[in-house]
Amino acid sequence: MRFLFSTGSLWSYSIERCVAFAAQTGFDGIELVVDQRWDTRQPDFVRRLIERYGQPVVAIHSPFFVVPGWPVDEPGRIRKAVELAERLGAAVLVHHLPLRLDYVWVRAGLRFFPLPIPLRRVSSHYRRWLERDYPRLQANTAVTLCIENMPARPVLGRRLNLYHWNTPTEILRFPALTLDTTHLGTWDLEPVEVYPHLNGQVRHVHLSNFDGREHRRPESGHLRLDALLARMAADGYQGAITLELHPDALDAGSPDAQVVERLGTSLAHCRRWAGQPTER
């Protein structure tokens, strides 16, 4: 298995800085999150980074909001992201499940809470596209489309499921999955216990821990990610594992050496749990 660094982990940094950090730390490649940064959508520039830093783009994450110059609808953005993946030689395209309830964030004091609102037509269109046209897109590309399990959203002390097919059983309707560990944590599910029930359909992993906050470093939280990686290694898992962290988990804004040190510690834990050499 290969370990990748997600450029979304430092979404406020330039793409080049993210790729440089991954190279310094010893990652095997990059998951490129397409977002508001123009550099994420310019394949010629990304290719130059690949050559300069020796970090291949192994996975692309389709944008989960509207970005300048790309289609405004979710199916259009996924098709565009597939084209980008093909041009960069990425093996995997990650995208999200469709919303069944939309929401907006509201502030109460110093905290923010999701407020459900009636479903927008665009989400219904995406769901119907997944049911009818998604298999055709997969049949016409060598890029593996991997749909991702999504988190619970706490509302008034209860967990709210905002997404269609967002259970370990329902999501099996899709042939290839991205297993997001911190999202399972929001449901009080242990990834190492869920993984065997996914019928071998996991083709990609977003790895991070959960301590009441999402996207913590793999060694910092209550999920048994050591057991998960050991199990996946024993099963001969051949896909990639992406460290997808929140910027504050890496002390974003601190000196670069400190960010790289944190990344290196996390990567060393992951390699050790997977039975790989920690120095490469």
Image (spheres, grey):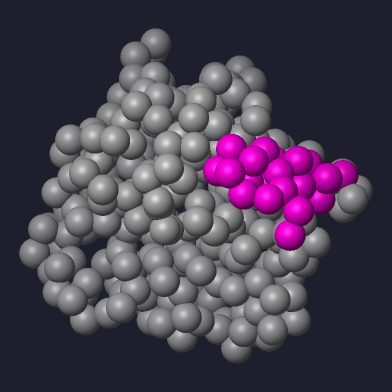
Magenta stretch: includes residue 254: no
* Closer-to-camera residue (117/180): 180
Q: Position of residue 140 (x, y in %)?
A: 21, 81
Give the position of the C terminus as an image quadrant: bottom right
State left or right for residue 78 relative to residue 12.
left
Tell me if I can see residue 35 in this picture. no
* Above or below, comparing residue 79 to residue 192 in the picture: below
Residue at 14% x, 74% y is: 136
Q: Position of residue 277 (x, y in %)?
A: 68, 50
State left or right for residue 126 relative to residue 44.
left
* Above or below, comparing residue 228 to residue 28 in the picture: above
State left or right for residue 35 relative to residue 120.
right
Judged by its main secondary structure, the magenta piece is helix
Q: Position of residue 197 (x, y in %)?
A: 24, 35
Residue at 18% x, 76% y is: 139
Residue at 19% x, 53% y is: 174
Residue 269: quadrant of the picture: top right
Residue at 46% x, 45% y is: 233
Q: How many marks?
A: 0
Tell me if I can see residue 160 in this picture. yes
Determine the residue located farthest toward the bottom in the rendered image: 44
Determine the residue located farthest toward the top in the rendered image: 157
Q: Position of residue 40 (x, y in %)?
A: 58, 72
* Above or below, comparing residue 163 to residue 241 in the picture: above
Q: Which residues are magenta?
A: 258-280
* Closer-to-camera residue (239/125): 239
* Above or below, comparing residue 156 to residue 265 in the picture: above
Magenta stretch: includes residue 261: yes
State left or right for residue 251 relative to residue 183.
right
